Amino acid sequence: METLKTLKIKTGTCKRVLKELHSYDKEVDREAAKTAAMKENGADPYDLKQQENVLAESRMMIPDCRKRLEAALGDLQGMLAQLEESGEDGEEIRDAKSIVKEVEALFETSSS
């Protein structure tokens, strides 16, 4: 029972970090559009520089988030393998497998 609780926690961690990664991707798109609009409108150089710093900070968060997601995925896969060896089955395991597939698909599309 304790291992299913741990699996649920690891699944939740993967979900949270995946959501964070999507959020940072959207933020980068939004800030890039804002930066482009400021350049196009001839914004004050200081304001433009500040906006570029905001964009750079957002971009820096994506690799960090990906590393955390990779680590969380590895933990989840290890726990899943352990539970499958012991013959466990249930909603938590199906949930975990679903998240593993989703994260693996994300990594496959981004590495192509």
Image (cartoon, rainbow, N blue to C red):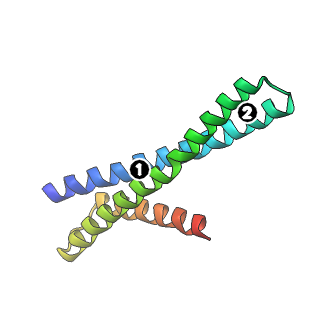
Q: Is residue 58 left or right of residue 42?
A: left
Q: How many marks?
A: 2
| Residue 70 on image: x %, y % | 40, 61
Front residue of 39 and 45:
45
Helix, strand or loop for disc 1: helix
Q: Is residue 65 above or below residue 31?
A: below
Is residue 48 visible to us here? yes
Contact? badges 2 and 1 (CB < 8 Å): no
Q: The N terminus is located in which quarter?
A: bottom left
Q: Residues within 10 Å of mark 1 (few under 14, many from 20)?
A: many
- Identify the disc placed on residue 71: none
Kind of residue indicated by mark 2? Lys
Kind of residue indicated by mark 1? Lys
Q: Is residue 73 above or below residue 84?
A: above
Q: Residue at x 53, y 46 (%)?
A: 60
Q: Residue 109 appears in which quarter of the rendering? A: bottom right
Q: Is residue 87 left or right of residue 66?
A: left
Q: Is residue 103 left or right of residue 57?
A: left
| Residue 34 on image: x %, y % | 73, 33
Q: CA distance from mark 2 to mark 1?
A: 29 Å
Helix, strand or loop for disc 2: helix
Q: Residues within 10 Å of mark 2 (few under 14, many from 20)?
A: some
Quick one: which residue is furthest to the right in this view? 41
- Identify the disc placed on residue 15: 1
Q: Is residue 48 above or below residue 106?
A: above
Front residue of 55 and 24:
55
Quick one: which residue is furthest to the bottom in this view? 85
| Residue 91 on image: x %, y % | 31, 58
Q: Residue at x 21, y 76 (%)?
A: 85
Quick one: which residue is furthest to the left in this view? 2
What residue is pinned by disc 2? 34
| Residue 88 on image: x %, y % | 21, 69
